[in-house]
Image (cartoon, rainbow, N blue to C red):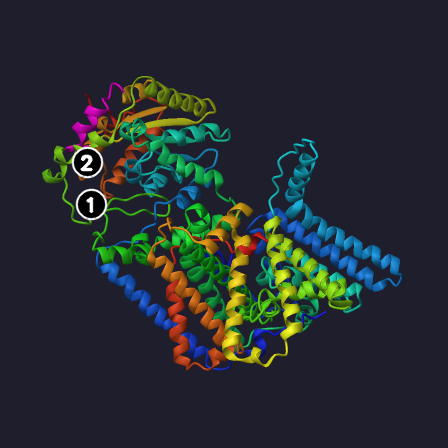
Amino acid sequence: MPAALTNSNERLPIGGWPRAWLLAAALFAIIMGTWEAVWRLKGWLPTVESNQESWVLARESIRPNSTVLTGTSRIQGAIDPDVWASVRGGDVPVQLAVAGGSPIPVLESLSADTTFHGLVIADMLPFYAFDVSHDAQAVTLEYLRAYAYAEHSPAKRWEAYLRTHIAGHFVYRRANLLPGDLIPALRAGTLRTPPAYIQRPDRYHPLLFRQMHIASNEPAVLDSSKFAHLRRVTRPATGARLDSLMARIERSVHQIQARGGRVAFVFFEPCGGRRPVEEELYPKDQYWKRLTAMQPAYSIDSDDYPVISTLPCFDGSHIDQNDAPAVTRQVAALVSGPPSVAVSDSATTPVAR
Amino acid sequence: MVFNSLTFLVFFGIVMLVYHLPLSWTHRKLFLLIASYIFYAAWNPPFVLLLMGSTVIDWIVAKRLAATEQPGARKALLLVSLCFNLGVLGFFKYGGFLLDNFTTLMSSFGVQYHPAHWSIVLPIGISFYTFLTLSYTLDVYRREMEPGNSFLDFAFFVTFFPHLVAGPILRAADFLPQCVQPRRATPDQMGWGLTLMVIGMFEKVILADTFLAPVADTVYGSVDKAGFIDAWTGTFAFSAQIFFDFAGYSTCAIGAALCLGFVLNDNFRFPYAAIGFSDFWRRWHISLSTWLRDYLYIPLGGNRGGEGMATRNLMITMLLGGLWHGASWRFVAWGGLHGSYLVAERGARARWGKAPWLTRAPVRVALCLLTFGLVCITWVFFRADTFGQASRLLRTMLSGGPDRLALGAASTLTVLGLTAMLLGAHWWMRDTSLEARWQALPWWSRSVLLATLLIALAFVPGDDRAFIYFQF
């Protein structure tokens, strides 16, 4: 039987719709366009938020033979995926590194994935991989948990893809420029200058030091005393705790490599005043050397390659986006060669230490 | 796929584009059918088979019902449809609930029964499309309508994406005739359809999700810390949230259908301006309340057979209506409370229904506020996770206590302000319609209003909260 109910069509507002919608669309475009332009003129650039959604999307895209990057913001800014794909015949790397995160949970997750037999390039920065104070592992585990509990439906995937790619084109979509964050920041006068980094939808994290006119090798910035606080915030793993972490890494490496996969450890050395602090807290012999002894397919210490070690120093940790292509080519060349053997090309010859 | 997503925006854009290509009417309906299956499959592809199964079974049953005269055979056919539809609903929606209750019952007799953990995913919108197909079979069984001639039309009626996952619950007699002649939206339908979609989205994304849901979540997440003001704020927040959430969805659905030239019935009519509970149920989730009236309350006997029978039928209808919302005794309690309000109202009407003072404005306002207050209190059972949580919150609402939640004056004032505006707007619109109010606006102010709503939507952070009624 009919529901015998009323409907909107019986009461339809009549007339004037084209002009009403045209004016509404024009007002919307003008106001949003102006808002977008204002922030761009102030130096803000569009970015994708470094959130779990883009990480889950990246994790879902891993295929059995993918190249996966994991670790910290250093590798997020150092490996340019476009350059990587161009030098490695279209092999687009999946970026799973997390700022301030540890590579260990991702290594373990990939080793547990029995279908995976690709290449893992792990940025094994000891400062995060072996810090037991602020628990960088917890940071990464949050992302893995998000992946485990995410609704892996087509709709969720499409939505994450669209959201990630659309946000990457509009400055006003930056989280700190949306009303929820912007209004309190403006009230408190705490809206900062635009940060010197952005994140692309593929989770590449270009650092814009030169574009933002941040000088390289600036003594005031790279003064050791600026990094003294690192001593207070980090507690290096030692003894049994360190042995346990090393054992977990070794087990993961062996499992991945036993399936035909390869693992490359990369150590992007700090520079400037940060370097002596990190070296003191995490001596190479105690951390990096133990990692290389696990016999991953490749061990890459940036100090061994002048292409990387001679780059200008900006904030003590990261390289500028203009330097990323050279670093990317260097690392790509190294992992394209036979495992653990230095290639003959001069650009990739380790320097004497 | 949800309306408040970019995926839907792209999907709807493609649907509109293809639908308005110069194709035959059959091809356009076929396209809408396929698009609707994609819309549903985007959430969980295998459950499309369930939807198809329900469509095919009810199509066949209705055809056979129309061709059969023998009462026994007709009853058997109806039973097939009821068993399939209610069986599927029972298995997916109530299986775990029944098992839990059976286990509790057994343990009360001292029998320790430990069944395997019930982990069945509830197919989205199953309660809606099950009721929709059931109404079709029941109508054909009662010879109130002839079965459709086109399977494509019937499948399209069941699957049409605007109503598929959260209603309004359509009736075949309302929708199938719309499938006969080619349809395209007129400029007025298109303009108003798009406007409804923007309004619905604003209700859902801005009002429900951005302003109200965080407050309701905070209060219901820490009931023990909530004091008198917190408890009432949380209750008002949820009362407004569920309206904006569900009415927002219905508004979007009606708008999306209108953009394609199809007409769906009203599902909400300013319910918080209701004077009494029979009035409330004529304004809230109208497609469900009329379904329950036509296919449950009246077949049970309605108000024929005296006060006692009417009370019994009302209570059965409302208890089952509550259970329809979810597999939990809390929903049954919610329905039971509404049933008892309706019964009490019947008694009051019998006694004072013709009293002249009832028509006075202050009395009407007072009765409206009383209805709203009781509806709000009843929502506590709907929103709380357990009876314990509901009773703690209700105790705090009635007896008070120190506010330790630190909701903040801004949140409290926002919720109270929005609730007051909602009540005011519903009262203002009570005897008119949104369309009439819109028509009265100068054309340029409609543009300004639309642009404002669109800009607000453009600034939404993008946490895609699902619609509350999706879980039903």
Going by the numbered disc 2, the residue's amino acid type is Gly
Estimate how packed mark 2 is, as few (under 14), some (14 to 19) or many (20 or more) residues with alpha carbons within 10 Å. Answer: many
Estimate how packed mark 1 is, as few (under 14), some (14 to 19) or many (20 or more) residues with alpha carbons within 10 Å. Answer: many
- Relative to residue B335, is residue B95 depicted above or below? above
Residue A18 image offset from top left, x and y in percent: 45, 78
Q: Residue at x 44, y 31 (%)?
A: A109
Going by the numbered disc 1, the residue's amino acid type is Phe
Does residue A40 appear anywhere in the picture? yes
Mark nearest the camera among 1 and 2 is 2
- Relative to residue B148, is residue B329 depicted above or below? above
A353 displayed left or right of B465: left
Q: Residue at x 74, y 51 (%)?
A: B84
- Earlier along the polypeptide chain: callout 1 or callout 2? 1
Residue that badge 1 annotates? A209
Residue that badge 2 annotates? A316
Label 1 vs label 2: CA separation?
12 Å
Give the magenta range: A271-286
Image quarter of residue A251: top left
Q: Is residue A275 magenta?
A: yes
Image quarter of residue B371: bottom right
Q: Is residue B251 magenta?
A: no
